[in-house]
Image (cartoon, rainbow, N blue to C red):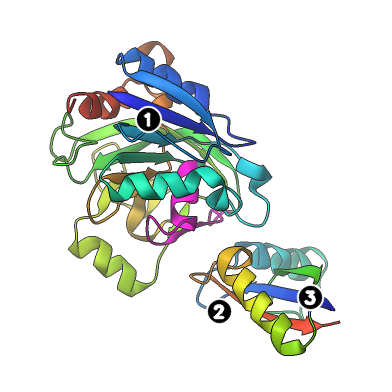
């Protein structure tokens, strides 16, 4: 199955890139309606698994081992 | 002193580290990151700076699962000294051999300049040849050097005297203006609890000759060499 893992910085961690994007949108492009910009990343992958439970187990494992640094990042995933 | 310098795809300070170690007459060997065994009688392992695996995903993340890292972990538990500089520091936090993480600089800029750092603890194997609270000049060159840890971890680091170096001004004062990247507590380098692992963003291997700016970094390598 196709899976998308979404990774974002925890709320308590300063998101410098999000701040820069916000500044560009508000100050340079004039979108004064915009605030609280946060940026992150996603990883798409395919997993051979018989059930959602099995895929979930694998995603949680790889998040722990490589994809996510849990000190500063949160993640969730969706099955596409 | 028998030392080894690890090279990952994208390392770029490995030869500088070798130069520094040769300057103090250490017997130094270079190894590739896919190496799955390191000699048991090593005294020092250096994880050099650079952009291992292009900094893909997160700085140091891919390198932290290279085969050689299992050996770094095994030998460090036996007390072998490990020095991680810049990207090497990032790799050591990603492997959890050191607490915390290095995030994007607060001004989102790559910074390359000489900074002043203060020796916070001159009783370790890495710093014995420095004076107490000595202020030294060493270059930094990084994009992700903003040391972050939660408040519990920072307290644990302070309680166990794990801060190795802090960014300071020329007079040795810890000041916001002297903090180049937004690091918590102006932290430029930390030890593990046992003090046999040191990770630091500044480059001591680039400060080994007065003709190129500073030789303050050489003292760190000499401190280690004096142990053997």
Label 3 SS: strand
Choose mark 2 or mark 1, whichever is in front. 1
Give the residues drawn in magenta, as a range.
B88-107
Q: In which quarter of the image is the N terminus of chain B?
A: top left
- Work out whether residue B155 can be spotted: yes
- Work out whether residue B166 can be spotted: no
| Percent coordinates x, y for residue B107 in the rendering | 56, 54
Characterize the local packing of mark 2: few (<14), some (14-19) or many (20 or more) Cα atoms within 10 angstroms.
few
- Chain letter belonging to callout 1: B
The residue where tag 1 is placed is: B204
Foreground of the two, A71 or B63: B63
Foreground of the two, B2 or B91: B2
- Chain letter belonging to callout 2: A
Characterize the local packing of mark 3: few (<14), some (14-19) or many (20 or more) Cα atoms within 10 angstroms.
some
Label 2 SS: loop
The residue where tag 3 is placed is: A4
Residue drawn at 68 percent across, 76 percent down? A59
Distance from the alpha carbon under mark 2 to that under mark 1? 35 Å
The residue where tag 2 is placed is: A11
Q: Are marks 2 and 1 on the same chain?
A: no
């Amino acid at each position: 199955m196709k899976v998308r893992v979404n990774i974002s910085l925890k709320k308590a961690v300063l998101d410098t890139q999000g701040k820069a994007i916000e500044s560009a949108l508000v100050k340079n492009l004039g979108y004064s309606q915009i605030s609280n910009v946060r940026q992150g990343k996603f990883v798409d992958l395919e997993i051979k698994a018989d059930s959602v439970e099995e895929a979930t187990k694998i995603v949680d494992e790889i998040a722990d081992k490589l994809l996510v640094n849990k000190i500063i990042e949160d993640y969730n995933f969706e099955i596409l | 002193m028998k030392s080894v310098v690890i090279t990952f795809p994208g390392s770029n300070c490995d030869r500088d580290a070798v130069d520094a170690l040769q300057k103090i007459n250490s017997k130094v060997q270079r190894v590739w990151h896919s190496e799955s065994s390191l000699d048991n009688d090593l005294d020092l392992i250096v994880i050099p700076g650079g952009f291992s695996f292009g900094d893909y995903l997160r700085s140091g993340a891919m390198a932290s699962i290279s085969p050689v890292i299992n050996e770094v972990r095994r030998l460090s538990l036996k007390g072998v000294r490990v020095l991680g500089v810049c990207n090497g520091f990032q790799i050591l936090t990603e492997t959890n051999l050191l607490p915390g993480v290095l995030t994007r600089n607060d001004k989102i800029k790559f910074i390359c300049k000489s900074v002043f750092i203060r020796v916070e603890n001159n009783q370790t194997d890495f710093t014995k040849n420095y004076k107490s609270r000595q202020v030294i000049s060493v270059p930094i060159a990084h994009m992700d050097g903003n040391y972050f840890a939660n408040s519990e971890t920072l307290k644990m680091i302070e309680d166990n005297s794990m801060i190795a170096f802090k960014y300071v001004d020329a007079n040795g004062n810890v000041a916001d203006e002297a903090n180049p990247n937004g690091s918590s507590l102006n932290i430029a380098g930390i030890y593990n609890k046992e003090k046999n692992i040191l990770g630091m963003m500044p480059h001591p291997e680039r400060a080994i000759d007065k003709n190129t700016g500073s030789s303050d970094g050489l003292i760190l390598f000499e401190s280690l060499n004096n142990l053997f």
